[in-house]
Structures are given as C-alpha cells and as structure tokens.
Image (spheres, rainbow, N blue to C red):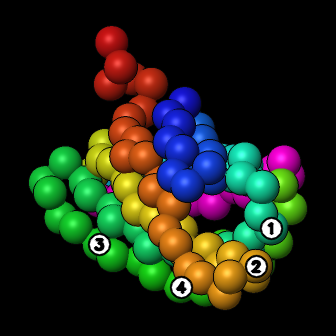
Amino acid sequence: MVNAITQNIGVSVETFFQTRKSNPEIDLFVYSYRITIKNESEFTVQLISRHWEIFDVIMERRIVEGHGVVGEQPILAPGQTYNYVSYCQLKTDAGSMKGYYTFHRALDNSTFDARIPEFILLPEYRKN
C-alpha cells in the first residue's frame, strides 16, 4: 500500500492483479486498485475530477481524465473517508500509475489538487 497527503487530504492505494480477467496471449493484463481518501482537514471538500497517468513497462503512457470517480463526486466532511475500487488494463504484465484528484472547497470557493502517489502494478509471479 502507498500513501500521500496533500493539503490534509490523505490518499492510499492498494493494488491487486486480476489473474482470471487477464489474458497474456493477447497482451491483456488487468489490475484492480482500492483507493481510500480521507479528509484530514477542517473543511468540507468535494472531489470533482481525476487525472491519471498510466505507464506500462515499455513506457507507453496513457492519460485518463474525467469527472469524479466511479460515477460519483463525493463530498467529504472533516474526518470522513471515501473508498472505491476501479481497474486498469495494461498491454504488459507490469506498469505504474500516478495522478491527482481535484477538490473543491466550498468555504472559500477554491480548488486544489491532491496527489495520488505513484504505485506499481506487478503480478505476484514477478515479485520473487
């Protein structure tokens, strides 16, 4: 698990290789990841968008951007946590992801980015 804190917004990531959904014969490697976002600030915030950079071992880079996460734009009061699970497909058996979430703070109508720490996508059989 990897963690980062930006402007008192904590982001933790845990990854899982999806053996049954992957098919190496056609260069399809699927990973799921569980994200935990914790508002450790004293202000209510809303996650409004995401920006991902996805790399595989041949350094092919993809950018994925969009509103919210998994169809939601969660509002987090101070101390609240939000969890979600999503997935990523690679053409190689290993890679990495990193990015940021953009949050809106209603109190002063400001926006800021919270870093998603870089994490490695690596199947169990490559960890030895």
For the point 37% across and 46% down, the residue is 118
Quadrant where the C terminus sits is: top left
| Residue 107, numbered label | 2
Q: Give the secondary structure at mark 3.
A: strand
Which corner quadrant of the image does residue 103 belong to?
Answer: bottom right
Q: Are marks 3 and 1 in contact (CB under 8 Å)?
A: no
Q: What main secondary structure does the magenta stretch of the protein show?
A: strand
Q: Give the secondary structure at mark 4.
A: strand
Question: Which amino acid is tagged 2?
Answer: Leu
Q: Give the secondary structure at mark 1.
A: loop
Give the mark toward the camera: 2 or 1: 2
Quadrant where the N terminus sits is: top right
For the point 46% across and 56% down, the residue is 115
For the point 33% across and 62% down, the residue is 54
Q: CA distance from mark 3 to mark 4?
A: 13 Å
Q: Are marks 3 and 4 in contact (CB under 8 Å)?
A: no
Q: Are marks 2 and 1 in contact (CB under 8 Å)?
A: yes
Q: Residue under label 1, please give it.
A: 44
Residues drawn in magenta: 79-91
| Residue 66, numbered label | 4
For the point 41% across and 62% down, the residue is 99
Q: Are marks 4 and 1 in contact (CB under 8 Å)?
A: no
Q: CA distance from mark 2 to mark 3?
A: 34 Å
